[in-house]
Every structure is written in structure tokens, then in C-alpha cells.
Image (tube, coloured by chain):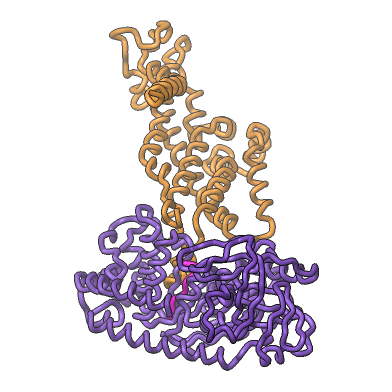
Amino acid sequence: MASITLNHLVKKYGDGFPAVNDVSIDIADGEFIILVGPSGCGKSTLLRMIVGLEDITDGDLLINGTRVNDKAPRDRNLAMVFQNYALYPHLTVYENIAFPLRLAKGKHTDEEIDRLVTEAAGTLELTDHLQRKPANLSGGQRQRVAMGRAIVRQADAFLFDEPLSNLDAKLRGQMRSEISQMQRRLGVTSVYVTHDQTEAMTLGDRVAVLKKGELQQIASPRELYEQPRNLFVAGFIGSPSMNFLPATIEGNVLRTALGDLAIPADKAAKAAGKKVVLVGVRPEFFEDAKLVEESKRAHGSTFRATLSHTEWLGNEQYGYINFDPAPEVRELLNNLAREMDADELRPQVVVTLDAASRIRGGREAEIWLDTRKLHLFDPETGDNLTRDVEAGAALTEEANQERAEEIANAQGDGHSTASGFASSNTGGGAPAGASAGGSSRGGATAAGGKHTTG
Amino acid sequence: MTSTKSKVLWGIVTVLVLVYALFPVASILSTSFKAPSDLTNQRFLPSPGQATTGNYEQILVGDAQGLFLTALRNSIGICLIATFIAVVLATLCAYAIARLDFPGKKLVLTTALAVSIFPVISIVTPLFNLWRSIGLYDTWPGLIIPYLSLTLPISIWTLAAFFRQIPWELEQAAQVDGATTWQAFRKAIVPLAAPGVFTTAIIAFFIAWNDFVYGISLTSTEAARPVPAALAFFTGASQFEAPTGAISAAAIIVTIPVVVLVLAFQRQIVSGLTQGAVKG
């Protein structure tokens, strides 16, 4: 168990290009941190700097308060799961998992190794495959073996480098909840690199968004979603992503391509002095005006627009409104899209409507917009003008407390069912380990559900 | 239908290729059992009742024994040493080429290629003079060094290509798992590289084993003369008898190590050991 501190970390390659630029993150003991960003943002490099596979050009890396910049990977006592699993093809599953234990010469007796490997295999449901070679395993099983190799030793922290990107969608969902459960049960500090939003939002206690090697914002998923610091974070987090509408401000009224929108005075005040702003509106802030309750209606404003088409998904539907922005704004939007790895951004607003809405493409309709939630961005700097720092901090603090509770719960459960690693020293042979694996699995799905809804 | 048809076709092609490739070997084998008087019988096989093992007796225990057995010992010794040195050097070189980025990497590979396409015959005469004046003529090192020039380039190229296929993530994974650089190399990379090294060693050995030009030009006595060169010094029982049978028998015997090597290491040669290391 360990805390990890990244102190102004910089990574420059031979050509002087900073792949990671001045990143500082404090990772608390037992915390699950996600590094997310478009490809080439330096997230994997940062992870490899932590584990010691990349040299640190500048700044300090501290594990439990000790500077480890110059320590070899093996002296950092971290476990890593690689994107391609990196299993040793000439060794059986058993020997693959036992590999780190065998390297620590003299530390473990053969019986101990056998017990630890059997336990790890039990937790990961690999007991039947211990004598097989990696080549004969399915993708999901290989992934489990890679995890087994990480959990079998008492590492200070787990590092994951896009561990699920090679799995199909269904298996990915399953492994995701298993990783989440395992992390809580073991209470091990974890750093997880991904480009997948769902993984970032569901797994992380805090999510660090990176762009071109620079840390944009680090906060709980909810804070990122509700109080993004800038245009990039706002556009990157959320699917379908946030709509950006150019607007001019006159008093408390935003003049946009969709029409005039009255906004709350406090928001307008924060944008005072700006001529042009970008309005950030998440699709779900919109609603079919006919379906908005009278009590809610006063909190927003309505406008009339013609949808080009709608997509009905069962639980909700998406509507699309095209608009024609001014050329300079179009340029800005395209730049933003490029930064986020997307193709050219179409000047289009996506609105989420209730599944019951009868609005269809081609017809003019009245749409309601919850103006309390929208954000105003400075188009030049990209800063969020309406960010509520305190509300955001409160959200992250909430997430912190939830984490502590979850770890306490998961570990409490673990003891009562004689599960895996928290109690590994008190023994329990193969059958006990296997049954514990089964029971913790049930817990995994239950809590996985809680995660996604929460 | 089509599958049986294509199977039959493939079968025919296979047989044709086998006959084409193995006919010379079969011819030599049958000649090696012919008595000197039977050589010109104008048949593929020895005349009925005249098949003899006399040729083998002659080279293994008979008159030609001294010539052949010492040559065989020279060949085995020189080729093994040359192969060993070539493989060790090539392994280090190829590892660096596949793994590191250093100035002159291209140069090393190009030089190796240039050396391997350089015609052997054109450097034999200078070597002959040089070896005589520095005392390497007709010695084992005098052959091992030229053999290295034949075996090293191809070893470097094969091994570099092989090493490039090994996922280096394995080495990094091992380091994270607690291995030193050396342990990571030995426990994660060497087992994967072994088949490639074996294959290279066998190829290098054959190249050295089959050499004739250096063998005949840089030796003069039994001190270092290898088998391919020694075959030319066989004589018949009298000056009117061609030593064809004895030469055939010797050729068959020197083919045996090659066949044994291939059979012994065929698992390594064809093994696809890296499968499953990464996402397949």
C-alpha cells in the first residue's frame, strides 16, 4: 500500500518534444486514479515513468515519500498489467503467475508459492487452466493471467496500461467491474491508463485528463462532468459530447444560432465584458418543451428549431439540429475537434429527448433548455467562465468519502467470506480460494451495477 | 470434389519435387555400394549380387582411412568452432541491432551484406599469400577465420530479423516483476530467442560444412584439410580405377551429420514459440 506523488514531472525525448509536461498529481493510498486523454497525450508515457520503464527528464516521483526517480523498476515494488498482457509464452499459466515470486529468491518457499498462486488463480477463476500455455487461452483468460501476475505479490500499487482495449465489448464490461471490485477488496493504490470514457468514469475515484502532455484537470468523474475547467475537458468527457454554440451576450440574453436564450443573471455576470462566448450545453439539458413539467419550466428557456433527424434508442432519443456558425468560430470548433482526436466537427447540436417525445426530423418544434446547467467558455483561452469551484470540490470530496466506505465494506466482506488477499496470510488452501473467488464474483456484479447508476 | 482434386494435384507436385531433390542423393547412395568394376554397368542400382560395402570399409577401416577420418575430424572441429563463434558474436550483434538505436546500425548491416555477397574465389589468393606469411596456412584457425566471414553475415541477418519479432514488452514486464536486466534477458528473452539461435547455428554450420574453395586452397596436409577437400585426394586401388565409389561413400557419410542435425532440431526450427505472447 502506498501513496504516489508526481511532482512537476517532465519527459522530453531526444528531439526536445515534451511528451509529458509539468504534471503534478498526489495519489492517496488506496486511490484509483485514471489517466485519460486522446492518443498521443502522454498518458502511457506518464504511467511508464511511474513504473520506471521511462526515464524522468525533470521533476520528482515519490512513492511513500521516498524519491524513486533513479530506482530500477524492480526496486519500486509496483505491479503492472500491460496492454498486450506480455505473458511469457514458454511458461505455463502457473509459472507465469509464479514468475514474480520465483524472482524474489529465498523470499518464498515452494509451498508458499504454490499457495499464493492457487489463491490468485482461484480469485481469477483460472484454476482449471494452470497447466496450459498462454497460446491456448482466450483473450479474456490471458487478461486474467496478466492480472494474476500482478496480484500474486504484495505490490505497493497496480498500474494498468489500457488492459481491456484488446477485449470485445461484453468481456470488457465484465472485466471492468471485476477490476473495480478487486481494487476495492485489496485496497491497493491503482493508476489506470485508458482512452475509453466509460472505463474512466466508472472505475476512477479521480480522473486526470491530459492533453499534449499537460494535465488539464484532475477531479472525480462527477466534477469533471458537471464542472469542467475548460473547453477540452468539457468536450472530452461525456457521450454524446457537449455541444458548443457561439453566442453574443446582451444583458441576460444569449444570442445564439438557435435563438435567443435567457440565462440566469449570475452566469451572465461571470461572462461580463466578453463579446463572444461559447455556450457549452450537454445534450441532456435539452427537452421536448411539451414534456417539461410546469414547475421545472421556469428554470430554463425555450426556442423553436427544426431537427434534421432523430434517433430513437428505446430509453431516450437523440435529435440533431444543424446550424451555420460564423467562419472564425467554425475554425475554433474544428481545432477543438482535432485536439480531441475527432474528425471535423459538424456544426450540429445534439439534443437528448424523452423517448415519448413525438418530435421528428423536418418538423419545427419547441425545445426547452435547462439554462441553470449550461457553461460559458471563453473562446480564446478555452477557460470555463461559469465554473463553480466549490461545488466541484464538494463533488470530489463526496467521491473521496464514498471510496473510503467502499474499501471498508469490500474488505469487511472479504474477511467474512475468507476471501483472497486481505487474509492471504491466515491461510486457506485451493478449495477455499476457489470458493472465495466465486462469492466475490457475485459481489462484483452487484457493486458494478451500483457503480454505473451512482 | 475440389478438395480431393487439389489434394491429388498437391500430391503429384510433392512427389515431383521430392524426386527432383532426392534423385542425386539416391544416385550417390547407390553408387557408394557399387564395386569399382561395376561402376560402369549403366544401371542405377549395382548389378545383382555385386552390391558391396567395400567402399565404406575402404574409407573407414581400409586404405583411405587415414585420409578420410582425419579430414572428418578436421571438418567437425573447424565447423563447430566457427559456428560457435559466429553464433555468439551474431547474437550480441543482432540483439543490439534489433534493440538499440545507435549510429552506424545501418552500416553494420550493409557491411555484413556486402561481405556475404563478395565472391569467395576472389579473396582466396590474397588469403593464401597472407596466411603463408603469417603462419596460418594449413591450420585450424586458418580455416575458422575465413569461415566466419561466410557464416557471420547470414547469422547476423537471420538473428536480427528473429529478434525483431520478440515482443520487448516481455522484458519490461519481467523487470517490473522484479528481474534485473540480466535476469529479464535470461528468463524472458533467451527462451524465446533459443529457436532462432538454433536455426541460425544450423544454417551457419552447414555453410561451413559445405565449403570447398577455402578448404582446398588454404590447406596442404591432413593437419587441417576438411572432408570436401579431402575427397579430391582419394585415389583408386590402381591408377586405372576411379575412386568414384569411395567418394560416394564419403559423401554419404558427411551427409549424415546434416540429416541428424535437422532431425534433432526440427522442433526448434519449426517451432512458433512466440505465439500467444501477445494478443493473437
Q: Position of residue A70 (x, y in %)?
A: 55, 80
In the image, which residues are magenta?
A157-163
Residue for point 54% across, 30% down: B212
Q: Is residue A289 visible?
A: yes
Q: Colour of chain A?
A: purple
Q: Is residue B145 visible?
A: no
Task: Between residue B208 and residue A111, name the one nearer to us.
Answer: A111
User: Which residue lies at the image location 38% right of the left edge and 8% below the top edge?
Assistant: B38
Q: Quadrant of residue A288?
A: bottom right
The residue under the point 55% across, 40% down is: B143
Q: Position of residue A189 (x, y in %)?
A: 44, 82
Asked if residue B271 lies left or right of residue B221, the reply is left
- Number of dots carrying numbers: 0
User: Which quadrant: the N terminus of chain B?
Assistant: top left
Q: Quadrant of residue A77?
A: bottom left
* Residue A441 found in image quarter: bottom left
Front position in the image: B102 or A369: A369
Q: Chain B is shown in which shade? A: orange
Tell me, yes or no, whether the highlighted magenta stretch contains residue B120.
no
